[in-house]
Amino acid sequence: MGDIAIHLADWGPRLFEAAILTLVLTAASFSGAFALGLILEAMRTSRCAGLRHVVGCYIWVLRAVPLLIVLYLLYFVLPDLGITLSPLLTGTIGLVLVHGAYMAEIFRAGMQAIEQGQWEAARALGLTRLLCLRLVAIPQAIRHMFGPLIVAAISVLKDSSVCALIGVNELTLTSRAIMSETFMPLHVFLLAGLFYLALGWPASMLARAVERRMNVRSAVRHTTRFRASKAQACLASLAR
């Protein structure tokens, strides 16, 4: 640790710049994956069977193919088709395509957690499907999806390191460059790991706090329902 402190003045600014780029890449990729996952889930629940099959195949393929293969296809194959993208844009698109498939599964689980009676009550009130989603389903589903979404954001952060292999100058590539200059891989990558920990740890703590809060609310809700049903049973017995 003493050696790391000695070299921190030299390595710190470069790693800090790379950490900022890693955050930008993570934020852009997560936002795009969130939007894509929402679109995919809306398409998967449509009445068109062909559209549902296409979305199902997309999700199945993108969850099965490694991220690196997707990045290589975008970075090396698209130029042959006349489309040349920067490494940063290529990495962002690759992360969006892959993690959008995982986001769709998170949205599916969140929607399935809503009781069927909620949908039936919304339809009984004459709400359209879009209004059902906006006013009834999504506000309730967000509570179930918040924790998994934070975990997904951490996964995007960690997977952003794969973008170093196509030339994105984020934390991993910068660390490898410093290692090539200093021949101190242990010190450099240990410091890079600390940077990743500093970026991901707050989100991890937030996910735990949200999970604890939701567990407490769920326990209170179940207790309230149990007491209400018990009170109704007592009143029914007295009425007899």
Image (cartoon, rainbow, N blue to C red):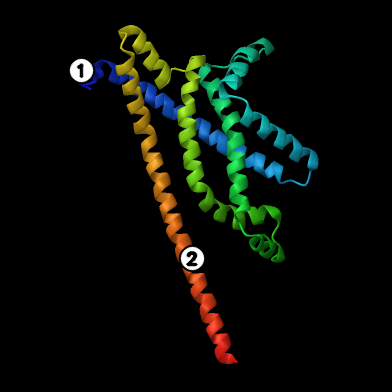
Q: Amino acid at mark 2?
A: Arg
- Give the image location of residue 190, x and y in percent: 32, 22
In the figure, residue 50 lies in which quadrant?
A: top right
Element at badge 1?
Answer: helix
Q: Is residue 65 above or below residue 43?
A: above
Residue 221 numbered tag: 2
Looking at the rendered image, the quarter that the N terminus falls into is top left
8 sits left or right of 65 in the view: left
Q: Nearer the viewer, residue 17 or 106?
A: 106
Q: Is residue 56 left or right of residue 158?
A: right
Q: At x 66% / y 39%, what residue is drawn?
A: 40
Give percent across and percent down for residue 179.
35, 11
Which of pointers 2 and 1 lies earlier in the amino acid sequence?
1
Q: Residue at x 42, y 16 (%)?
A: 173
Residue bearing the label numbered 1 = 6
Q: Quadrant of residue 59?
A: top right
Distance in Å between CA atoms under marks 2 and 1: 54 Å
Looking at the rendering, which quadrant does residue 42 occupy? Answer: top right
User: Circles 2 and 1: CB distance less than 8 Å?
Assistant: no
Q: For the residue marked with disc 1, what is the amino acid?
A: Ile
Q: Residues within 10 Å of mark 2 (few under 14, many from 20)?
A: few
Residue sitting nearer the eye, 196 or 31: 196
